[in-house]
Amino acid sequence: MFANFDFDVIRRSLGYLFFDGMTFTLTLTGLSAFGGLVFGTLLALMRLSGFRLLGRIAGLYVDLMRSLPLVLVIFWFYFLVPYLGQWLTGSSRPVRVGAFTSSLVTFIMFEAAYFSEIMRAGIQSISKGQPAAANALGLTYAQTMRYVVLPQAFRNMLPVLLTQTIVLFQDTSLVYVLSIPDFLGAASKVAQRDGRLVEMYLFAAAVYFIISSAASFSVRRLQARISIVR
Amino acid sequence: MNYHWNWRIFWEPAPNGTGTYLDMLLSGLVLTIETALCAWIIALAFGSIVGVMRTLPSKTASRVGFAYVEFFRNMPLLVQLFIWFFVLPEILPQSWGLWLKQMPHAPFYTAAIGIGLFMSARVAEQTRAGINSLPRGQKLAATALGLTTAQAYRYVLLPMAFRIVLPPLTSEFLSTIKNTSVAITIGLIELTAEARAMQEFSFQVFEAFTAATVLYLLVNIVVVTAMRFLERAIAVPGYITGK
């Protein structure tokens, strides 16, 4: 069954797959995880702020994002981002947005909802005495969050945040629906050009598998180390 | 925003001759639900078996279960679907491959099986967590009563474990529904694909996606409400308080 398996097509396209495709995938993953964490933390703070309206808005946003399929959200933002750009820059026509920017905005907005749930759990896991003590020391709300609550919440939730980032890494492959050459998109382009679907897709699967399982193995080790401290 | 809104588009006939645009979206919704249900049955069946295997005393069984979960969890769903759809028919013996390629509704079956197996790894993890969350005494008491391992699982551990993990299983089911949209890449014309087609036919991008969004939200609400009733109905008195 692997008699006419052509390893050469993989070797020939390694440069394209990794320098173009994987770079795109990893950059998108990294930036989205960072942006998603920042916005997610803001959303979590909004939900826990005690201001009804802010909390409701953040809650609605999170629930909305979490009940939609990522593919639909990718399409939404692909068409919406040009109009958002027009609105932000005040230009008279919808702004032209590149594939990378569009998918970056999508993933940041989408992941923010998931990261916010993780950060919310993290913030709620900090005992009440901590912010109370910070308050008694005369720290403002911002200082309490910045120096007392968020560092601990972040640390407690680090394994979960990293696991979510691995999920994000796998999910970035869905930009395929916009024909963007991320790692899978690049593999698929070569596959269709050379008629080598079997080789390219199996290779892509193997690469994703190795990266994800290595990453989740490290997360598990990290978790074991952290849980001893507590 | 110089976008031309036209909400009446839903009642206009779609060019593919199947009725109005609304009919088109609704048929996509039906396919989404059908695919999700088939996938969910597969996910529950395989997931429960693998989840139980991971808690068995046998080292081999738990290793096999571990390998199964890692295998399906560490590849993107999209890649898995491509492998089932494009690669499998090629590496099977020729006559089988041909049969697979000529099978009617191939995207539907591929999606149901591919998404089902992908989700089964997650269901397995939940099942395992549920069984492990039971106090050790339950298994010991079952053994002391003379139940075999199979009986202990059937009559003592699983009925409790499944009730405990019902809330996380609900969100796995919701993920299954959402994941059906990934099958758009192998040509399954489900709800997202119909919305995309409507956008291409009519150029009413935002109406099409709004309608799809509303339909997904409705499905979500129905599932969540139904599961809440189920949770309340099967809650074990004095053990898990429905919440």
Image: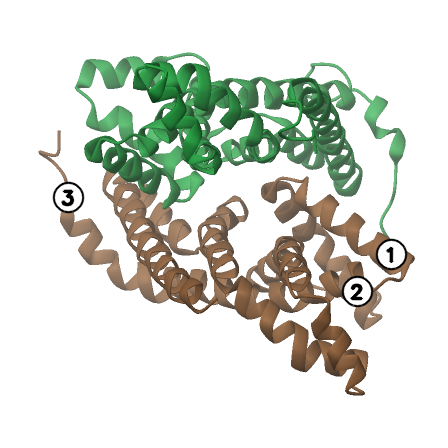
Chain colours: A brown, B green
Which residue is nearer to you in this view: A92 or B42? B42
* Chain under numbered label 2: A
Which residue is nearer to you in this view: B154 or B17? B154
Q: Is residue A35 above or below residue B162?
A: below
Q: Quadrant of residue A19?
A: bottom left
**Amino acid type, residue under disc 2 in the picture:** Gln
Q: Quadrant of residue B215?
A: top right
Extreme left residue here?
A: A3
Q: Is residue A101 above or below residue B128?
A: below
SS for dot 1? loop
* Chain under numbered label 1: B
Which residue, given by chain and number where applicable, does mark 3 sit on? Answer: A6
Which residue, given by chain and number where applicable, does mark 2 sit on? Answer: A86
The spot of residue B169 in percent (x, y) is 56, 31
Which residue is at 86% across, 62% downward? A50
Residue A66 disc label:
none
Quadrant, the N terminus of chain A: top left
**Amino acid type, residue under disc 3 in the picture:** Asp
What is the CA distance from the residue labelled 1 to the residue labelled 2? 8 Å
Q: Is residue B157 above or below residue A111?
A: above
Extreme bottom residue here?
A: A138
Q: Are marks 1 and 2 in contact (CB under 8 Å)?
A: yes
**Amino acid type, residue under disc 1 in the picture:** Met
- Residue A215 appears left or right of A168: left
What is the CA distance from the residue labelled 2 to the residue labelled 3? 48 Å
What is the CA distance from the residue labelled 3 to the residue labelled 1? 52 Å
Question: Would residue B188 be visible to someone looking at this image?
Answer: no
Residue B1 disc label:
1
User: Dot 2: within a 10 Å radius of its alpha carbon, few (fewer than 14), some, or many (20 or more) residues?
Assistant: some
- Residue A130 appears left or right of B63: right
